[in-house]
Image: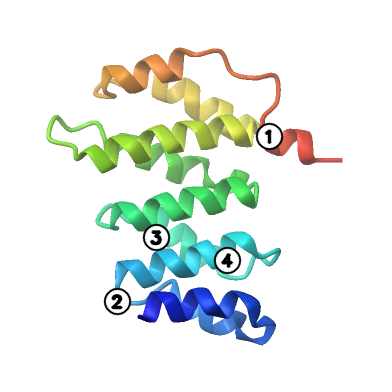
Amino acid sequence: VRAAAVRSLRREGEALAVVVASVDDSMSQVRAAAIEVLTASRSDQGWERIHQRLRARDEWPLVTAAAIGYVVAHCRTDAAEALFRVVMRAAPGNALTEDLNNAALAIEALRALGSPEAVATVEQLRSTPGVPLTLKTALEQPLAEDGQCARKSP
């Protein structure tokens, strides 16, 4: 119910502060909904909270996936290190399927960002032991000349 309430605030311009505060809600569904609303907005308000969620090792996969979506939508090139952490969560042999899925999303986000930091992070991941073979294969794919975000820049 609270997640639906947060989603309904998408249409209320004055409610941005409530949505930003909801990024720190106790329920993962509410946190994810808040991040999704902020992803669709033009405002960068809430980035610090979203960045904390992205870096949190114990965050729910649903929230992490929403945060990765925000990174791409807002071209947050300063998220490369946090995306590295997301990929490394899939490194243990007992990683959850959701961790592997988010790691794949993080690799695609790095490609979309296309910044020097993102390219360096991909290079670092290519040489990092413990990265699952399926992800290593994705990392070995040639990088585009410039990512989606680089093409958006003037």
Q: Earlier in the sequence, mark 1 or mark 3?
A: 3
Task: State which quadrant residue 24 falls in.
Answer: bottom left
Residue under numbered circle 4: 38
* Residue that sits furthest to the left in the current view: 94
- Say what amino acid the circle numbered 1 marks: Gln
How far apart are the alpha carbons under marks 1 and 4? 19 Å
Residue under numbered circle 3: 53
Question: Label 4 neighbourhood size at 10 Å, few (<14), some (14-19), many (20+)?
Answer: many
Q: Report the label total.
A: 4
Q: Earlier in the sequence, mark 4 or mark 2?
A: 2
How far apart are the alpha carbons under marks 4 and 2? 18 Å
Helix, strand, or loop for circle 2?
Answer: loop
- Say what amino acid the circle numbered 4 marks: Leu
Q: Earlier in the sequence, mark 2 or mark 1?
A: 2
Helix, strand, or loop for circle 3?
Answer: helix
* x and y, in percent, of residue 111 in the image: 57, 29
73 sits left or right of 126 in the view: right
Whether residue 89 can be seen here: no
Question: Label 1 neighbourhood size at 10 Å, few (<14), some (14-19), many (20+)?
Answer: some
The circle on residue 26 is 2
How far apart are the alpha carbons under marks 2 and 1? 33 Å
Quadrant where the image shows the C terminus: top right
- Say what amino acid the circle numbered 2 marks: Ser
**Residue in the foreground of this view, choosing between 35 and 91:** 35
* x and y, in percent, of residue 114 in the image: 64, 31
Q: Nearer the viewer, mark 3 or mark 2?
A: 2
